[in-house]
Amino acid sequence: MRPLTNGKAVLIALAIATVLTSAGSCDASSPSGGGEPASGASANPGSTTSTGSTGSTGNAGGASSATASLNALTVAAAGPMSGYSRDKFTHWIGQGSGCDTRDVVLKRDGKDVKAAADCKITAGSWVSPYDDKAVTDPGALDIDHVVPLAAAWRSGAAAWTADQRKGFANDLTRPQLFAVSLQSNRAKGDQDPSTWKPPSHTYWCTYAQNWVTVKAYYKLTVTQAEKTALTDMLATCK
């Protein structure tokens, strides 16, 4: 066989180098996915959705994130209640198929839930997370706003528009709405964690995480006493 000329040898070497370079240039990076704004990110309190959410799961990892979000919140004295009215937080709004926000939460939080043709809930079983009370009568349940409407008013919602307040009062995306016993909801009223905590101590971790998630999303302030109480509750996470 005749030896290759220098020119042919160079061309073959270049071709081999090109193949090897191409084989080693694959992109191994994973595609990035979309998601909810991080705690404290810019929020649109006027937007609502009927997707439903069961809220945060109480755990140590979530507590670390919640603590960071809590520390990022502005600490301020509670604002005045002048001008406040529950009617300024329109609820319960229609969520489609004849259901309103209350109906959606009762369906989401219950088991074996039955509804009439107009979507009104007629039967089912629920466990109130605040006091572990078993409930089978939907009329014995309230839909609790984790951050009460009046508490939101005192911490920033007084400056919101009517649409923003309506979005907050019917928020099915953040961990803001839960079916609870009448007794626990009435005992809570509009209090923050510095003056009221769920009777079920095992729920404190989740409750504190949910409270912080809502306040961070809507950029509401916290009082120093409220922050201290939330810090203590997050310390129960395991």
Image (spheres, rainbow, N blue to C red):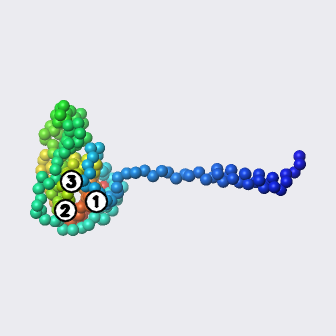
Front-most of 173 and 223?
A: 173
Image depth: mark 3 or mark 1 in front: 3
The secondary structure type at the circle numbered 2 is helix
Q: Is residue 194 visible?
A: no
* Kind of residue indicated by mark 2: Ala
Residue lying at 35% horizontally and 52% vertically, measured from the top left: 36
Q: In this rendered view, identify the residue nearer to me: 10 or 182.
A: 10
The residue identified by callout 1 is 216
The mark total stands at 3
Q: Position of residue 183 (x, y in %)?
A: 12, 47
Q: Name the kind of residue labelled 3 in the image.
A: Asp
Where residue 121 sits: x, y (%)?
18, 36
Q: Give the number of the mark in front: 2 or 1.
A: 2
Q: Is residue 223 above or below residue 120?
A: below
Image point (23%, 64%), residue name:
221
Q: Which residue is mark 3?
A: 163
Q: On the image, numbered disc 2 is attached to which residue?
A: 159
> Crowding at label 3, few (<14), some or many (≥20) Cα neighbours within 10 Å?
some
Query: As drawn, is 17 to the left or to the right of 223?
Result: right
* Dot 1 amino acid type: Ala
Query: Is residue 6 at all visible to an observer of this figure?
Result: yes
Query: Along the polypeptide, which appears first: circle 2 or circle 1?
Result: 2
